[in-house]
Image (tube, helix red, strand yellow):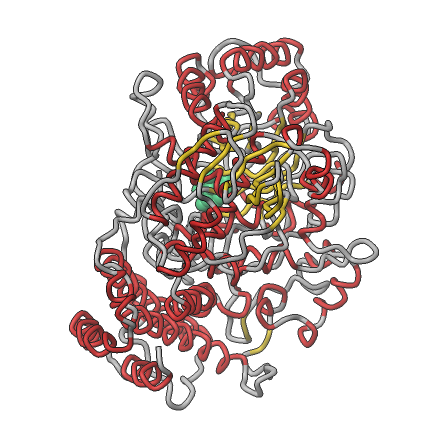
Amino acid sequence: MPEILRRTLRDVFRHMTRARLALLPVLAVMLLLAATPLMAPAQAAAQAADEDGYALWLRYAPLPGAARAQLQAQARTVVRLAPASPTTDAAMAELQRGLAGMLGKAPATGNTVADGALVLARAADLPDTVRSSLALADAGTEGYVLRRTRLQGKNVFLIAANSDIGLLYGSFAWLRAAASGAPLESASAPALKLRVLNHWDNPDRTVERGYAGQSIWDWWALPDIVDARYLDYARANASLGINGTVLNNVNAKAEMLSPAFIAKAAALAGVFRPYGIRVYLSVRFSTPLELKETATADPLDPQVRAWWQREADEIYRAIPDFGGFLVKANSEGQPGPQDYHRTHVDGANMLAAALAPHNGAVMWRAFVYAPGGTKTDDRAKQAYDEFKPFDGRFAPNVLVQVKNGAIDFQPREPFHPLFGAMPRTPLMMEFQITKEYLGFSTDMAYLGPLFQETLAANTHHGSPPLSVADVLQQAPGKLTGMAGVANIGSDRNWSGSHFDQANWYAFGRLAWNPRGDARAIADEWAAQTFSRDTAVRGAVTGMMMVSREAVVNYMTPLGLHHMMGTGHHHGPAPWVDNLERPDWNPVYYHRTARDGIGFDRTATGSNAIAQYAPALAAQLADPRTTPEQVLLWFHHLPWDYRMASGRTLWQELISHYDRGVRQARDMQAQWAALAPAIDARRHAETAARLQRQAANAQLWRDACIAYFQSVSGLPLPAGVAPPAHDLDHYRKLRFPYAPGNG
Ligand code: GCV
């Protein structure tokens, strides 16, 4: 989009009053008309067919002429030298599907090597000379090498790997490169072993914090009726290298381990197996007790241990490659070993013993906080306090699964202090892909930058200092992993909005390579999902890269956190101070007062900074050396505190809220200008969401400023628009049917 149009639009939006926002649809049409001539005819043609988003990034859209001819030359036939298996069948089918889409015609398949063949071969299927030129040892058990080479005297393109699943991943990588216009030759292997989605799906098909319809698991119909969609789910995940799925909510029901549900899980496992995806279950710690099969759930009780062993044996009879258990224990009212005066180690190791003979793993969550908020003066400290002393005491098949930050998936959190603090324990990252606190699936917030920011953070532990990504990989020979709380549901477009698909995508790509670049991932996704055209994908990527920061700005800038509405977590409610647990109240976190704002986590406050490595703690002890992005997470500062910009904290805070609103409006305008290049359906569906997002941004901005002003007593800086309503108006807003409270 040309700069002049961008600036004009920005000014228009900036000066719009709320009443005029109603005119946005009209403006969108005007923009559409105005922008049409800016697009090349080819782009305009590309928008013809409406799309519903079901195909995700696996659309395999027809390639433009030159690219098509080039690709055709690399895949005149598709040849399988590897033996037939369900997994190589899947690879062949995907290559056929992808090439048919991109070239307009599926190439012939066979097993005769000819010039221009695309060849699938395992190391064992290749002559020594070719094998040794490929450095396949680096590919490990899941990686691949994509290389032009000579084979049997012919020029071929080789997809090579040490295993069938490597061939499938290599096929997806080859198709991704072809679809997005990236170099076809590459080699890659995953950095982490377990790359797992966590579904928070309930047996009644509600989804806790789900904003994409119902659960995609039709539990009622399973195992007899197996929806074809499960296969597409497997394809999409395998295309990213995701190799595990926890089917049910961490707030688990005991029935999930009943024979009926094991049979349902087994049916899903059967669909996923060729795609390298293992099924896991979240388990309720008190299951044997609740099913009335034992008199206690004490992890040291022999009968309880025997019960879990029998249960594991039974699961593995039904699902031989079952992945293991995910456990939320002694957190938010869930049962756990502490109910019997036992420890997290006792609980995790009991389950680990039951799974070990079958090669299963326990993912034991570190998201714990005490009932009543009584155990500590700062909820942010509890996980570290409880888990750090147990470093090195968990069984080898236990991973401690740690959320990216110490509170709860806020728009921005500093990395969790446990990363780097438990060097003798495999720590597994837990990100939230579903956007519980970032505007559900209505607001656009591309999470790639959030994920990358955490993974790249310097823990200051180790020498040389380890990043969070290094920590995830730090235990050679041990289990490693990354989990993402899924944003997938029964909605036709899978994720509730088209752009939320990018968060699933980014999670998968970063689970494969935690050092990946969020912008490059966005660009790759945009090319496959919308258009290969440089200008279009550039504009889409530009919006995506701003979107999460926009949300931070209009919701919780400068390190503020946990200011959302009660229960459903939609909308601003910084004033809430009456919930039974102190650490459920927003006022507990932002501590707005006449004298200033922010949570003092230095030595004069909760001293949570001491949980970080000394060099980092020293940096965080001083507001001057604390990054402004997280300033109020660590410090309570006076309103007239001077920021790096020269503005006071009060002025700066307000300027962030205003910036967030502007950014939301800018995204609307940028998207409007893309109308000629995107199919009408996906364009309109996204435009409607962006309009809602702009209104949501305004609501957050106005409500928060009204609240802060009511406490600080300060006048608004000159030129700042007052909130549209008084504080009472915002306090009275209710959202009784907000989704995701399943
Ligand atoms: C599954 C937050 C969410 C809960 C979620 C919990 C968790 O508190 O609001 O819905 O429960 O995190 O991660 O266990």
Residue positioned 56% across, 67% down in the render: 598
Q: Residue at x 32, y 62 (%)?
A: 731
Q: Is residue 394 left or right of residue 280?
A: right
Establish if 689 lies above or below 401. below
Q: Residue furthest right?
A: 463
Residue 711: quadrant of the picture? bottom left
How many discs mark residues in the rendered view? 0
From this view, report whether residue 291 is shown above or below residue 399.
Answer: above
Q: Position of residue 391 (x, y in %)?
A: 76, 38
Relative to residue 203, is residue 379 depicted above or below?
below
Q: Position of residue 502 (x, y in %)?
A: 43, 53
Q: Is residue 311 visible?
A: yes
Q: Quadrant of the image for the C terminus? A: top left
- Foreground of the two, 65 or 190: 65
Q: Looking at the figure, which quarter contains the N terminus?
A: bottom left
The vertical placement of 251 against 435, above or below, is above
| Viewer-closest of 330 and 206 | 206
Farthest front residue in view: 153
In the rendered structure, the answer to whether residue 330 lies left or right of residue 21 reads: right
Q: Is residue 707 left or right of residue 146?
A: left
Instruction: List the single residue furthest toward the bottom.
Output: 718
Any part of residue 19 in sight: no
Residue at 26% in and 63% down? 687
Q: Residue at x 32, y 76 (%)?
A: 723
Please provide percent x and percent y for residue 54.
Answer: 31, 44
The x and y percentages for residue 651 are 48, 82
